Image (cartoon, rainbow, N blue to C red):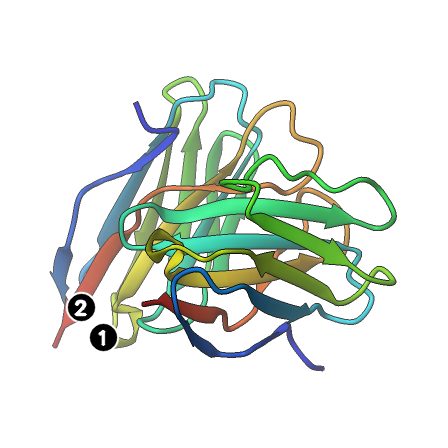
């Protein structure tokens, strides 16, 4: 079956612009995670969605970052007024539900802020 | 102290040898432990999970967990050039009811023919 998909695969933007990154999880997976991978920080958690519960936003680095998940499926990560330090690969993962369920990662979106 | 630390690499082993990858974690009540493999330019892929003390074997891979020492390792037997990748140790901390992963910095493994 189809895996996690993300779009765009690459995004180049100018400092100060807003960007939207999209994630389509595996069908039927109720848990959705966003992570960020950068050279200096490694792979770090950003936000978690589970069904209709309130998301865990504890990993978002600043209030310029926000995310939503519509209809319990597709998720969008928005970064406002991008900064050069936002340059990274943004990874989305989904899992069936539980904490022990395998998380399946999407191919990521490489964001470059000039 | 970092929450999850991996042995500094890069690690280079000859084909057919055993590769040993190590990871320590700081949260004593961490509950779930994972090893992910990440090829260059690709996304992480789960290769092993372990939840209780001892060894867990899957093909050429063995994960070892020692909660008293806060230590988890991955052994790769009969290493192949296709095993060359970055290996990421990940932990679910205590008190977390879902799969929020905390990752180590990764160890780059190179298996040379």
User: Could you tell whether B92 is left or right of B41 in the image?
Assistant: right
In the image as oriented, which residue stretches furthest toward the front? Answer: A16
Which quadrant is home to the C terminus of chain B? bottom left
Residue ID at (34%, 55%): A38
Q: Secondary structure at mark 2?
A: strand
User: Image quadrant of residue A77?
Assistant: bottom right
- On the image, the x and y values in percent for residue B81 come to 23, 75
Closer to us: A106 or A112: A112
Same chain for the residues under marks 2 and 1 in the image: yes
User: Image quadrant of residue A70?
Assistant: bottom right
- Of label 2 and label 1, which has the lower sequence position? 1
User: Image quadrant of residue A93?
Assistant: bottom right
Closer to us: A7 or A25: A7
- On the image, the x and y values in percent for residue A83 come to 39, 55
Residue ID at (80%, 40%): A54
Q: Secondary structure at mark 1?
A: helix
The answer to whether any part of residue B60 appears in the image is no
Say which chain tag 2 marks.
B
- Total numbered circles: 2
In the image as oriented, which residue stretches furthest toward the bottom? Answer: A1
Residue ID at (80%, 56%): A30
Q: Which mark is residue B81?
A: 1
Asked if labels 1 and 2 touch by Cβ distance under 8 angstroms, the answer is yes
User: Could you tell whether A86 is left or right of B10 in the image?
Assistant: right
- On the image, the x and y values in percent for residue B73 come to 35, 41
State the CA–CA distance, disc 2 to disc 1.
5 Å
User: Could you tell whether A12 is left or right of B91 in the image?
Assistant: left
- On the image, the x and y values in percent for residue A12 come to 40, 75
Residue ID at (65%, 23%): B95
Say which chain tag 1 marks.
B
Q: Which residue is mark 2?
A: B111
């Amino acid at each position: 079956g189809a895996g996690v998909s993300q779009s765009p695969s690459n995004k180049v933007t100018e400092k100060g612009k807003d960007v939207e990154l999209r994630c389509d999880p595996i069908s039927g997976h109720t848990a959705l995670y966003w992570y960020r991978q950068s050279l200096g920080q490694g792979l770090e958690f950003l936000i978690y969605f589970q069904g209709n519960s309130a998301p865990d936003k504890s990993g978002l680095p600043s209030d310029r970052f926000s995310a939503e998940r519509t209809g319990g499926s597709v998720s969008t990560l928005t970064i406002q007024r991008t900064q050069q330090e936002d340059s990274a690969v943004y990874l989305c993962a989904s899992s069936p539900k539980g904490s022990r369920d395998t998380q399946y990662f999407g191919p990521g979106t490489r964001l470059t802020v000039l | 102290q970092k929450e999850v630390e991996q042995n500094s690499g890069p690690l280079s082993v000859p084909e057919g040898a055993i590769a040993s990858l190590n990871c320590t974690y700081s949260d004593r009540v961490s509950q779930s432990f994972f090893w992910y493999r990440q090829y260059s330019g690709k996304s992480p892929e789960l290769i092993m999970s372990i939840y209780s003390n001892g060894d867990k074997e899957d093909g050429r891979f063995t994960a070892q967990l020692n909660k008293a020492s806060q230590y988890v390792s991955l052994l790769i037997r009969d290493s192949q050039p296709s095993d060359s990748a970055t290996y990421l140790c990940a932990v679910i901390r205590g008190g977390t009811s879902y799969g929020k992963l905390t990752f180590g910095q990764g160890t780059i493994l190179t298996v040379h023919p």
